[in-house]
């Protein structure tokens, strides 16, 4: 179940990156719709965080260690909101680029999470 | 692109592309510091050199992030020096890991020129130095 969630979150992160990359290409800052997109991705990472903790509580063990697993879950959760706040402070296309970079970073984190869980 | 709208007393280093740099450096700080902290705490004896180098890298990244956010001419120069040091670190450690892999039983942030981090460690100082030099011209 966690693997499916990881896949969905990773794909959503890449879509967000492409969307904000498109905005940057058109020389636009992030708009309300982009923030809704960021919220959706953030909710996915939050669900993932909760699901991961529940699985740990049920006694399942990540292949590469519990500490690293939780650290990556927290990092994935914080990633897009942090980039979102930075794009609020930078109302130019560079704010959009920052969120796009955030999406790519999250996608990389999801790949690592998949490995760490041992899927 | 709108680079400056207001002119505060300190040179702002985080406007425009600078914001992207702060974000990437922030990611590298979290990555390098948390990684080395975990490795030094749990398995330092396995690869002391690699883990110490990762910790140093994390400190350098942290300092550069701070100078970028703070802004100003002094900070700009300090950031330039650190970026040069960072670039030198990536090149030296990257070459070292390729020439003598036995010295590194485990990877550092700068192994193989930062390949494990999408080559961001080697691209970041180059773009940051370019940006910092341009920031003076404004």
Image (spheres, coloured by chain):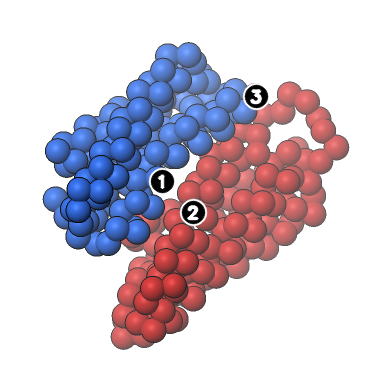
Q: Residue at x 18, y 53 (%)?
A: A60
Distance of label 1 from label 3 (alpha carbons) = 31 Å
| Badge 3 element | loop
Q: Categorize mark 2 by other alpha carbons within 10 Å: few (<14), some (14-19), many (20+).
A: some
For the question of whether residue B130 can be seen, the reply is: no
Q: Residue at x 20, y 53 (%)?
A: A59
Pointer 2 residue: B30
Chain B is shown in which shade? red
Residue A17 drawn at (x, y percent): 36, 31
Mark drawn on residue A111: none
For the question of whether residue B103 can be seen, the reply is: yes
Q: Seen in the image, is A49 located left or right of residue B79?
A: left
Pointer 3 residue: B2
| Badge 1 element | helix
Q: Residue at x 73, y 46 (%)?
A: B70
| Badge 2 element | helix
Q: Quick one: A8 or A93, which is closer to the camera?
A: A8
> Residue B116's quadrant in the figure?
bottom left
Chain for disc number 1:
A
Chain for disc number 3:
B
Chain for disc number 2:
B
Residue B64 drawn at (x, y percent): 63, 55
* Direction right: furthest residue: B9
**Residues at marks 1 and 2 touching, judged by CB atoms closer than 8 Å:** yes
Which is more foreground, mark 3 or mark 2? Answer: 2
* Chain depicted in blue: A
Q: Residue at x 53, y 25 (%)?
A: A93
């Amino acid at each position: 179940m966690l693997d499916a969630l990881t896949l969905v979150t990773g794909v959503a992160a890449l879509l967000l990156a492409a969307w904000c990359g498109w905005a940057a290409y058109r020389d636009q800052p992030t708009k309300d719709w982009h923030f809704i997109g960021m919220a959706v991705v953030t909710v996915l990472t939050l669900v993932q965080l909760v699901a991961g903790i529940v699985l740990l509580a049920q006694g399942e063990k990540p292949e590469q260690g519990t500490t690293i697993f939780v650290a990556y879950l927290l990092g994935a959760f914080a990633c897009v909101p942090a980039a979102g706040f930075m794009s609020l402070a930078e109302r130019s296309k560079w704010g959009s680029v920052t969120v796009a970079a955030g999406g790519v970073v999250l996608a990389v984190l999801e790949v690592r999470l998949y490995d760490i869980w041992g899927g | 692109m709108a680079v400056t709208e207001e002119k505060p007393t300190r040179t702002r280093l985080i406007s425009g592309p600078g914001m992207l740099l702060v974000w990437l450096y922030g990611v590298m700080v979290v990555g390098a510091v948390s990684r080395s902290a975990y490795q030094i705490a749990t398995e330092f004896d396995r690869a002391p050199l690699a883990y110490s180098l990762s910790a140093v890298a994390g400190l350098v990244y942290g300092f550069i992030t701070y100078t970028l956010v703070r802004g100003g001419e002094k900070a700009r120069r300090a950031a330039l020096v650190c970026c040069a040091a960072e670039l030198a670190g990536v090149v030296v450690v990257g070459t070292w890991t390729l020439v003598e892999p036995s010295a590194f039983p485990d990877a550092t942030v700068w192994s193989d020129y930062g390949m494990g981090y999408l080559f961001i460690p080697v691209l970041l100082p180059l773009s940051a130095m370019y940006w910092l030099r341009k920031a003076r011209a404004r």
